[in-house]
Image: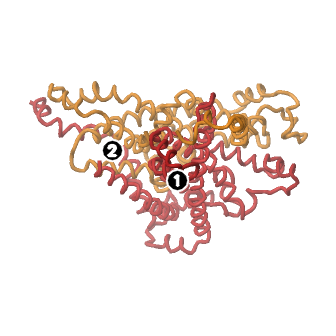
Chain colours: A orange, B red
Amino acid sequence: MYPTPIAKTSPAWQISYQALLPVALVLWLLPLIGVAIFSLKPAADFAQGNYWGWPSTFSGIQNYTLVFTGSDMPRYLMNSVLITVPTVIGAVALSCMTGFALGVYHFRGNLLIFFMFVAGNFVPFQILMVPVRDLTLAMGLYDTKTGLVLFHIAFQTGFCTLFMRNFIRALPRPLIEAARVEGVSEIRIFAFIILPLMKPAIAALSVLIFTFIWNDYFWAIVLTQGADSQPVTAGITSFNAQYRAAYHLMSAGSLVAALPPVVMFFAMQRHFIAGLTLGAVK
Amino acid sequence: MTSSFWRRNQQRLAPALFLAPGILFFAFYVIFPILQSFRISFYKWDGLSPAEPVGMQNYSQLFEDPAFYTSLGNNVIWLFLYLLAIPAGLAIALFLNQTVTGIRIYKSLFFFPFVVSQVVVGLVFTWFYDPTFGLLNTVLEAVGLDPVNILGDPSKVTYGIIAAGLWPQTAYCMILYLTGLNAVDPEQVEAGRLDGAKGLKMLWHVILPQLRPATFICFVVTIIGALRSFDLISIMTQGGPFGTSRVLAFYMFEVALSEYGFRMGYGAAIAVVLFSIMMVYIAGFLWKMYRDEKGA
């Protein structure tokens, strides 16, 4: 193990390391801790210039209640859910199939198609912006959640295919050969042999795509406007315009907007990290 | 009859069948729009009235546009400074790669900034930098230094935004390195210790070579992230003050969907330039993948 395990070092360093850990963490998260403190303060503290002192009264509950009752925040959050969940399902479903096709079969153009997905996943959004906005308008889906979902599914399929194909490649091949000898059809091989083995990959991709899509801002402002369809990342700017200079509310709103992927991460940590490494670092 | 045809040819037909939905979606929303953007870049178009072909005019205008050069210059700064996330991530990973009680919670909490949306990171840092009440200036004041208005100063603003971006990006690299460190071969480390390798020497000669896959992914995601930077600029400064914090991704958006009228053709030309820069890295990545495939 590198660096040297702490248990094998001098007692002095062992104690300093234990002391250093929380200090480093607080410094690292300082900007976020600041916002968390803001969100617990009453409005009066800001008016009196008490920015960083102890809250004069604990107003966390009022602030967070107001976020949910005094604005469109619940609608934005709901929109985010209604955009994110279908995207995850769609992109994972499509890429299970593309990954299977590219990972199992040998045919001409296999690598070419695979590289098309990989390259597409890395292109700058701006090269897609004008035509995708135009397409969405032409289909009558501008400013709808459906329009956003369809685009997200298509774009995320690139990354998901990269991941799924590499995952399927690493599965034991004799499994498939044996099934073929038994006369099992290709579709049944996919559904009953490969798909069950892909559960960890599906879990990893789901949490990862959930986070990506929940946190998307660019496409939200390009393809939607207003509380009917905008997700919370875009909604937070309207929220902040509504409560301009009300820092306690803007802080609370931001934390609420940021929370769902954080919860997802802590709940599914192992899968999340497996996904992040693009399946390449094991 | 049809079923026996399927039975005989299913191994050749199945891949096409499985690929079709994914490819159709992807071609419709990604591949086809890329080609279209290239085409639009030769037109003058406000998104409503018919597009008017103008040849290379958008590009020649681009090369005389000072805002384009500001954006391009900032992209270069982003690209280089963003790479700091890699050594910083490695440093934190080495710091946290221990087995004391509670270390897992620490690792997760250090990773935290990456999971938070860039919009929130942008807001958090805007308040952090705020000249009147921001935590940064509160601290500077406490130690007797003059307050700085980072986001209002054309010479500092880009660096301020990059610092905000480095926060989640460092967390990302950290987690990649932590995963990589897990897989480091303990026998090689022991052998290195017997040979008297310690500290940085060990890191350089024994550990880093084994971390190469992690380093490679760090480079890929950091470079792509740097060139994609949009959210932070949009949230923190809207490209200001006086357009000094623009990058190509933001400038393109600004031009194409500007409140003073849409200039889709000009925007598409900027996007094509950004795409071409990105393509250099994408081609490099594909080339490495291709070699790995052939080697495997």
State whether residue B203 is above or below residue A86.
Answer: below
Question: Which quarter of the picture shows residue B248?
Answer: bottom right
Crowd band around label 1 with a 10 angstrom C-alpha radius: few (<14), some (14–19), many (20+): few
Q: Residues within 10 Å of mark 2 (few under 14, many from 20)?
A: few
Amino acid type indicated by mark 1: Trp
Residue B159 location, x and y as percent?
67, 58
Residue for point 88% across, 35% down: A44
Percent across and percent down for residue B216 are: 46, 51
Image: B152 above or below A82 = below
Horizontal side of B205 relative to A187 (left or right) equals: right
Side (left or right) of A271 relative to B132: left
Q: Position of residue B18 (x, y in %)?
A: 28, 37
Judged by depth in the image, the label closer to the viewer, 2 or 1, is 1
Return the residue at label 2.
B24
Q: Which residue is mark 1?
A: B204
Q: Chain of mark 2?
A: B
User: Residue B175's quadrant in the figure?
Assistant: top right
